[in-house]
Amino acid sequence: MEYLFQPLRTWHIQVISIAELVDNILTKRLNQWCHVHQIKIVELPTPKFLTPWDWFQEQLPPQPLYSLTKFDIAQRRRLRILVEGGNPSAANGAVTQTIAKNYPKIFRFPQ
């Protein structure tokens, strides 16, 4: 990664901003190189995933469970998909259309 950081040092860059990474290895390497080159790294949230990490962690129970029912219901309510009156509705043959209709318009769903 030296080839990426050498120009940053030459240009006296002190802070870089990146979108949240999911790749732990890449995150670790970037953090190491930023530390070596004394560059601050700022991770910005991105809507690329349905579930923000902080919200997901809030949903985790204190003890491991093997049922995702509560999480599934909370996720449906948060995204406003497959719910009627705040309660999960039965999935029918038009699940994709329901999700696509209620999901933020920045995402495209296959037709």
Image (cartoon, helix red, strand yellow):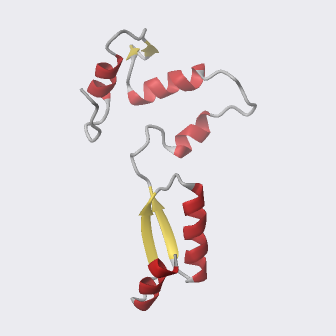
Q: In this view, does 97 lie to the left or right of 50?
A: left
Indicate the quadrant where residue 53 lies: top right
Percent across and percent down for residue 25 are 59, 59
Percent across and percent down for residue 92 are 37, 9
Indicate the quadrant where residue 30 lies: bottom right
Q: Is residue 80 above or below residue 91?
A: below
What number of labels is visible? 0
Percent across and percent down for residue 99 are 34, 24
- Pick the quarter of the image with the C terminus: top left
Percent across and percent down for residue 89 are 42, 11
Indicate the quadrant where residue 76 lies: top left
Q: Is residue 84 above or below residue 15?
A: above
> Which residue appears farthest toward the right when viewing the image?
63
Q: Is residue 58 left or right of residue 111?
A: right
Q: Which residue occupies 73% across, 34% down?
A: 62
Q: Is residue 83 above or below residue 11?
A: above
Q: Is residue 8 above or below residue 41?
A: below
Q: Which residue occupies 53% across, 23% down?
A: 72
Q: Nearer the viewer, residue 18 or 85?
A: 18
Q: Which residue occupies 32% across, 31% down?
A: 103
Q: Is residue 77 left or right of residue 101?
A: right
Q: Nearer the viewer, residue 81 or 31?
A: 31
Q: In this view, does 2 lie to the left or right of 10?
A: right
Q: Which residue occupies 27% across, 36% down?
A: 108
